[in-house]
Image (cartoon, rainbow, N blue to C red):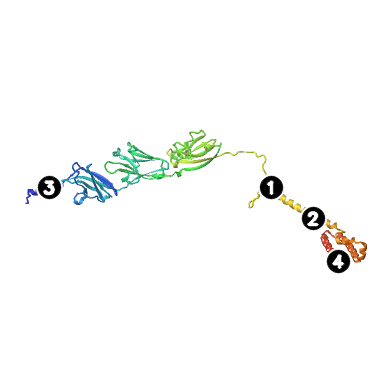
């Protein structure tokens, strides 16, 4: 049997004491994948100048991750604030493999002081369930977020997006400051629900939101909300025309579930600045027809100022799909007047366009008939003139100037020129013969006789020349 010498026992005890760690309470830290986590490790007085380090699991030499005497590493960094007696360790680019047990260590002579740390790493996303809320542009909406009874006095907040790791840093509003621009946060502890109201909605407000509750130990608790902001395109619009001084009726349908709601009609270019017109004008009367899910508004004795845009609805929350937009236009009644003497005008026909006025046809017909009558009279006058000239020429029609001159020749010239005398006698007898023939001839031969006479005259003139 082997006996232990006192020296051997002392050596074993020394080795065992050197490896003993003084452990304090366990501290829990949490982080998200891809993000960073920071361990804060406080220590007691008089240890400011001692070396500090971080190790994992059993904290053997190979488990040591970083020491204060070493330079920072890409994944690990350490900083010793000796004034506050706290050294902190940062782990970057977290992954699920980084989760586990860590030790904050202070090197001493013989016994190292240790503080146990537990790290939990979660995925940076939320959530398994999402609440969907819809609203319309320029409206307001309320997002409701439930929480546990243990979080009653904890900070509440809301942010945009789906990343819990940065939600608190990017919070739109928190319970510490419950009014921020168009965001208002109210906390109803009796129902364990906080509500965030958003006013003056725009399409840019659509998207994902996270309701967060901060916890002192562990990760914050979140619930997801998806907000959809629609355009006001879904408003039912109609146009109506009326006459000044006469009545008009406006019809406003509403959803069946609104039959017990207060119905109203307001006037204004925009629903936000329109005023209830039924209660302020005696000329307006409203009648609800539940059977047809609509109500009628009758306006008596329309006035010019009644023209404009009207909004009729049955929902005080101004849901776009429940409203009717009516554009009312007015005309003045036609004035009756007596015409004393209508003006007359001669229409000028347009080429390619039929003339529909019978007065123009009559005018053109009279003009054409007058022209034809004048032309006929002119032809008759010319014809009569020619006939009279032919008849009146009986004796001296074919008497040329040269023959008349010869008749004036003295008797002694006639004796001297017997040939001329004989010629004159022959011509005279021929004229009488022709005249008798002309009287016996019909009217249809007058023109031919006149032509023959002219030919004879030409022959005679040739003979005497």
Image quadrant assignment for residue 262:
top left
Near-viewer residue (333 or 12) = 12
Q: Residue at x 80, y 56 (%)?
A: 383
Question: CB under 8 Å between callouts 3 and 2?
Answer: no
Residue 177 is left or right of residue 49, and the answer is: right
Instruction: Estimate the spatial distance between the alpha carbons at disc 1 and disc 2, rounded to whole Å.
Output: 35 Å
Quadrant location, the C terminus: bottom right
| Residue of label 2 | 382
| Residue of label 3 | 14
Residue 183 in sight in this render = no
Instruction: Estimate the spatial distance between the alpha carbons at disc 1 and disc 4, rounded to whole Å.
Output: 68 Å
| Residue of label 1 | 359
Instruction: Estimate the spatial distance between the alpha carbons at disc 3 and disc 1, rounded to whole Å.
Output: 141 Å
First-in-chain label (3 vs 2): 3
| 337 over 61 or under it: above or below | above
Residue 248 in sight in this render = yes
Q: Nearer the viewer, mark 1 or mark 2?
A: 2
Q: Secondary structure at mark 2?
A: helix
First-in-chain label (1 vs 4): 1
First-in-chain label (2 vs 4): 2
Q: Which mark is residue 408?
A: none
First-in-chain label (3 vs 1): 3
Q: Nearer the viewer, mark 2 or mark 4?
A: 4
Q: Residues within 10 Å of mark 3 (few under 14, many from 20)?
A: few
Question: CB under 8 Å between callouts 1 and 2?
Answer: no
Q: Secondary structure at mark 4?
A: helix
Residue 38 is left or right of residue 253, and the answer is: left
| Residue of label 4 | 463
Instruction: Estimate the spatial distance between the alpha carbons at disc 2 and disc 4, rounded to whole Å.
Output: 34 Å
Q: Nearer the viewer, mark 4 or mark 3?
A: 4
Q: Secondary structure at mark 1?
A: helix
**Residue 138 spot, x, y in % from top left:** 42, 41
């Amino acid at each position: 049997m082997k006996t232990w010498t006192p020296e051997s026992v002392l050596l074993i005890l020394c080795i065992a004491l050197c490896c003993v760690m003084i452990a304090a309470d366990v501290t829990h830290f949490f982080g998200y994948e891809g993000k960073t986590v920071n361990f804060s490790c406080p220590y007691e007085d008089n240890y400011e100048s001692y070396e500090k380090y971080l190790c994992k699991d059993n904290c053997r030499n190979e488990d040591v991750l970083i020491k204060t005497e070493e330079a920072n590493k890409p994944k690990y960094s350490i900083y010793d604030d000796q004034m506050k007696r706290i050294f902190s360790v940062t782990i970057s680019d977290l992954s699920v493999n980084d989760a586990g047990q860590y030790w904050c260590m202070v090197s001493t002579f013989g016994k190292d002081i240790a503080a146990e740390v537990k790290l939990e790493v979660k995925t940076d996303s939320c959530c398994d369930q999402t609440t969907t809320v819809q609203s319309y542009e320029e409206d307001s909406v309320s997002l409701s977020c439930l929480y546990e009874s243990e979080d009653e006095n904890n900070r509440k907040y809301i942010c945009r997006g789906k990343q819990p790791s940065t939600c608190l840093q990017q919070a739109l509003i928190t319970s510490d400051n419950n009014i921020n621009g168009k965001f208002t946060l109210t906390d109803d502890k009796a129902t364990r629900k906080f509500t965030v109201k958003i006013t003056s909605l725009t399409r840019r407000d659509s998207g994902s939101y996270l309701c967060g509750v901060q916890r002192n130990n562990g990760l914050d608790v979140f619930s997801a909300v998806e907000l959809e902001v629609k355009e006001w395109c879904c408003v039912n619009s109609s146009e109506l025309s009326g006459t000044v001084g006469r009545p008009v009726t406006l019809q406003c349908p509403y959803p069946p579930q609104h039959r017990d709601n207060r119905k109203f009609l307001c006037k204004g270019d925009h629903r936000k600045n329109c005023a209830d017109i039924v209660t302020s004008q005696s000329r307006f009367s409203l009648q609800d027809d539940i059977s047809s899910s609509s109500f009628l508004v009758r306006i008596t004795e329309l006035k010019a100022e009644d023209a404009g845009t009207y909004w009729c609805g049955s929902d005080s929350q101004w849901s776009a799909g429940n409203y009717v937009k009516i554009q009312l236009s007015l005309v003045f009644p036609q004035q009756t007047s007596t015409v004393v003497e209508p003006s007359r005008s001669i229409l000028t026909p347009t080429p390619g366009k039929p003339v529909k006025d019978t007065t123009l046809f009559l005018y053109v017909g009279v003009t054409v008939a007058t022209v034809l009558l004048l032309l006929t009279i002119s032809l008759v006058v010319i014809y009569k003139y020619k006939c009279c000239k032919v008849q009146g020429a009986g004796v001296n029609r074919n008497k040329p100037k040269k023959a008349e001159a010869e008749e004036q020749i003295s008797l002694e010239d006639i004796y001297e020129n017997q040939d001329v005398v004989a010629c004159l006698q022959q011509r005279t007898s021929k004229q009488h013969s022709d005249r008798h023939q002309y009287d016996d001839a019909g009217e249809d031969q007058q023109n031919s006789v006149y032509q023959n006479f002219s030919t004879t005259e030409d022959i005679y003139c040739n003979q005497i020349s």
